[in-house]
Image (cartoon, rainbow, N blue to C red):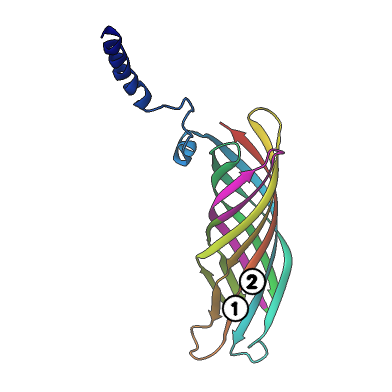
């Protein structure tokens, strides 16, 4: 009888042990939000050379100019930018960048033309183990055109979406300071502006329409990791 009682007690004690939930010793995987909240910060100062390509389309009451167009290809301009970035992990980082692509001036068809392009964008980059990176950006450009034709002057600024593709390489100088080399391909749209003599109605005007602007830019920057 004692053996039967002892066996029953042992069976009762054994059931909870086998039915209890099993806990894994593996650590939970960090979520994406925690990466972005806990990552490091950095700042970048860049100097940039850009090669701009676009076409100006003209219309005017002057028949010699009406319907004319002028194409610009790989016109060099110089600018720069400042960026503040955040490192999520060993591969992903993002940054907010603002700068000036540059200023281009030209004289053609009896008119003086000036194009100035500041911008603001948000960039996402993927870093490889060899310090190379690729990325993309989305933002706004605020191109301004100044047009002067004889004694008539006009200017116009517009807001355009700006799309970027980029690739680069970072070379560490110290634990906190790196040189940043970057190529960027950008697409944006320019404004149209009309210069006219308001003293005479119905005549003496010139309008230029700047179509899509393609920008190939090459920059060298200094990056500081906080």
- The residue identified by callout 2 is 113
| Label 2 SS | strand
Find residue 79 and report its horizontal and vertical position in percent: 65, 53
Report the residue at 54% width, 54% height from top. 121
Report the residue at 61% width, 74% height from top. 211
Q: Is residue 38 above or below residue 156?
A: above
| Label 1 SS | strand
The reply to whether dot 1 and dot 2 touch (C-beta < 8 Å) is: yes
Q: Is the magenta stretch mostly helix, strand or loop?
A: strand
Mark 1 vs mark 2: give the one in front: 1
Q: Nearer the viewer, residue 63 or 110?
A: 63
Segment tinted magenta in the rendering: 111-137
Find residue 127 and report its horizontal and vertical position in percent: 64, 42
Find residue 71 and report its horizontal and vertical position in percent: 71, 75
Estimate the spatial distance between the alpha carbons at disc 1 and disc 2, rounded to whole Å: 9 Å
Q: Nearer the viewer, residue 24 or 57?
A: 24
Question: Is tag 1's residue or tag 2's residue first in the polypeptide sequence?
Answer: 2
Report the residue at 45% width, 36% height from top. 34
Q: Is residue 204 above or below residue 136?
A: below
Label 2: few (<14), some (14–19) or many (≥20) C-alpha neighbours in 10 Å: some
> Is residue 100 visible to the viewer in this orientation of the structure?
yes
The number of callouts visible is 2
Quadrant that contains the C terminus: top right
Report the residue at 61% width, 71% height from top. 212
Residue 162, labelled with which disc? none
- The residue identified by callout 1 is 208
């Amino acid at each position: 009888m004692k053996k039967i009682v002892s066996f029953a007690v042992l069976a009762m004690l054994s059931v909870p042990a086998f039915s209890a939930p099993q806990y894994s010793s593996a650590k939970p995987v960090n979520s994406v939000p925690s990466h972005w909240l806990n990552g490091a910060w950095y700042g970048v100062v860049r100097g940039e050379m850009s090669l701009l390509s676009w076409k100006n389309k003209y219309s005017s009451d002057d028949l010699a100019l009406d319907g004319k167009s002028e194409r610009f290809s790989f016109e060099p301009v110089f600018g720069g930018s400042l960026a503040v970035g955040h490192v999520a992990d060993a591969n992903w980082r993002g940054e907010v960048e603002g700068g000036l692509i540059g200023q281009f001036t030209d004289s053609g068809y009896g008119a003086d033309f000036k194009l100035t392009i500041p911008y603001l964008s948000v960039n996402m980059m993927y870093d490889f183990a060899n310090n190379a990176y690729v990325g993309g950006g989305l933002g706004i450009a605020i191109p301004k055109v100044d047009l002067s034709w004889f004694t008539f002057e006009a200017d116009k600024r517009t807001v355009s979406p700006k799309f970027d593709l980029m690739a680069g390489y970072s070379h560490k100088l110290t634990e906190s300071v790196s040189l940043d080399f970057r190529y960027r391909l950008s697409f944006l749209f320019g404004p149209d502006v009309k210069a006219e003599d308001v003293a005479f109605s119905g005549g003496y005007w010139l309008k230029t329409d700047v179509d899509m602007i393609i920008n190939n830019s090459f920059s060298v920057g200094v990056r500081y990791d906080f």
